Amino acid sequence: MSSAVRSQRVFNVSAWDALPAALAVGQLVLVGVLFVAWPGLSWPARIAWLAIYAVSVGWNLNSIAHNFIHNPFFRSARLNRLMSLVITLALLSPQTMYRYVHLKHHAGNGDRPDAAGVTIDPLSIYQHGWDGKAEPMLSYVFLEFFRGDSPFELARKIGEKRPVEARAALTEFWAVIAVYGAALAVGLFTGRWAFTPLMVVASYLGQCVSNLSGYYEHLGGNPDKPIAWGVSTYGRVYNWIFLYNGYHAEHHYRPKIHWTKMVALHRQIAAEQAAEGVTVIAWAHPLGFLDPKTWKVATARRPRSAQGVAS
């Protein structure tokens, strides 16, 4: 049997997905290595490694975990459940719950609030904006994590239509509690007491890195034009590292297109994108604040007097 035939039996779309799968496993292994090495590290070294970990969480959410949502890597449901658990433990964030929220994001595609002040997209940069404008970047980056539903509410919502997924989501949640709770218990007796709480902080900061990327993936996009829902950036190195997440207008336009085919999709629709005014920035999304195009987009945060408008 040829290697191509074997890979078709293992991988759902492309054998290239062996790369993000291996990287996810590698990230989880490095978390374990950090735990083991913790007592022998100086505090500057610990902080440096935690900073690297935080950045890696933002990277994973916008590359590995993101692509796994739209195109699960494996044909085997068991392998996909295992992959979901690996990503969950590497990020301290249940992947199945992330999937639910992210698919709601695609259902709304960065929509503006309706007459009741509500968006379909729970991650919309307009949700807490005002007068048709996106909210300012800093509040979105640091507060968005706290605005979502609790894990138990997310599991309840998932269970309304997909009870099996809801059970998987809760299993992942409790796996995080069990693994990192055990790490905390062991750490209390082995000089690693600070590992778990600082990993929680670093994971939150990684979510903030992801929010920063998400903000500039949509600031300047047009919620009323499907081809222009997202904002793209075409730097090669950024797209290699983030598995072509830079092709974000293309991704929102055709979310099931595999990451290896984004360049081809862009070439196919480039003329239509130009005609419809798709926003393209020169900087990678996490550095979008450096791009002059983003400076020209007016933002406004919903005033406190109107905070209760949205339910």
Image (cartoon, rainbow, N blue to C red):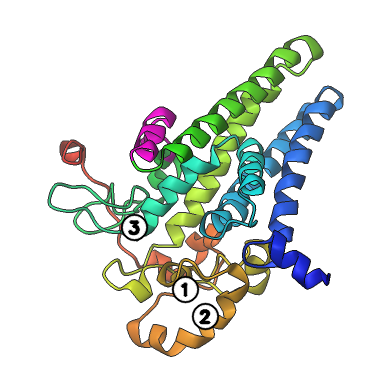
Tell me the residue at 57%/50% (across/down).
Answer: 61
Q: Position of residue 284 (x, y in %)?
A: 57, 65
Q: Which residues are magenta?
A: 145-160
Q: If the image is split into quadrants, where does the N terminus sit?
A: bottom right
Judged left or right of residue 285, residue 7 is right
- The image quadrant that residue 307 belongs to is top left
Mark 1 lies on residue: 250
- Residue farthest to the top, as pictured: 189
Q: Amino acid at mark 3?
A: Ala
* Closest to the observer, 153 or 129: 153
Q: Position of residue 96 (x, y in %)?
A: 51, 42
- The image quadrant that residue 142 belongs to is top left
Magenta-drawn stretch contains 155: yes
- The image quadrant that residue 253 belongs to is bottom left
Tell me the residue at 52%/80% (across/down).
Answer: 265
Q: Amino acid at mark 2?
A: Leu
The CA distance from mark 3 to mark 1 is 16 Å
Q: Answer yes or no: do the residues labelled 2 and 3 have beta carbons within 8 Å?
A: no
Q: Amino acid at mark 1?
A: Glu
Q: Answer yes or no: do the residues labelled 1 and 2 have beta carbons within 8 Å?
A: yes
Mark 2 lies on residue: 265
Q: Position of residue 26 (x, y in %)?
A: 77, 46
Q: Secondary structure at mark 3?
A: helix
Q: Earlier in the sequence, mark 3 or mark 1?
A: 3
Q: Residues within 10 Å of mark 2 (few under 14, many from 20)?
A: some
Q: If the image is split into quadrants, where does the C terminus sit?
A: top left
Tell me the residue at 56%/33% (across/down).
Answer: 172
Mark 3 lies on residue: 107
